[in-house]
Image: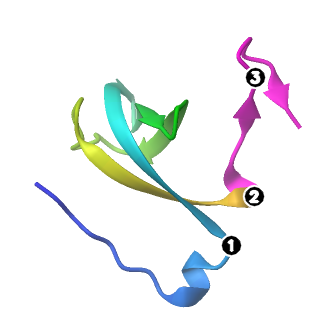
Amino acid sequence: EDADVTFNAEALAGALVLPATVEAVEPVGAESFLHCAAGGSRIVVRVSGRAAAKPGDQLRVVAKAEKLHWFDQAGKRVD
């Protein structure tokens, strides 16, 4: 099932939009981690509650740039 959420222009200002494919879903307590492939990279998206997404689902991940955390291939945070 596809769902679209619409935000106002102010909410999207400075946001990064990435098309992504879900590779794995990891439910962890009150949130879930979606492990995804996006533009040749792997990303992990944290969402509240149980994610309805499943492996193979196509998503558009929308996030404010200042909320992102970057890591190198060894897992070390890049500042």
Please give the residue where the numbered disc 2 appears in the rendered image: 66
How many numbered marks have been drawn onto this rendered protein structure? Answer: 3
Which residue: 33% across, 50% down?
59
Image quarter of the N terminus = bottom left
Is 51 situated above or below 59?
above
Which residue: 81% across, 27% down?
77
The amino acid at mark 3 is: Asp
Does 72 lie within the magenta span? yes
Please give the residue where the numbered disc 3 appears in the rendered image: 72
> In terms of depth relative to the viewer, which is nearer, 27 or 72?
72
Q: Is residue 78 left or right of residue 31?
A: right
Please give the residue where the numbered disc 1 appears in the rendered image: 14
Residue 75: mark: none
Whether label 1 touches label 2, CB < 8 Å = yes
Instruction: Tell me where residue 65 appears, x and y as whole percent.
Output: 70, 58
Q: Splitting the image into 4 quarters, where does residue 25 fall?
A: top left
Magenta span of residues: 66-79
Please state which of the two labelled residues, at mark 3 or mark 2, is closer to the viewer.
3
| Crowd class of label 3 (few under 14; some 14 to 19; many from 20; radius 10 Å) | few
Does 43 lie within the magenta span? no
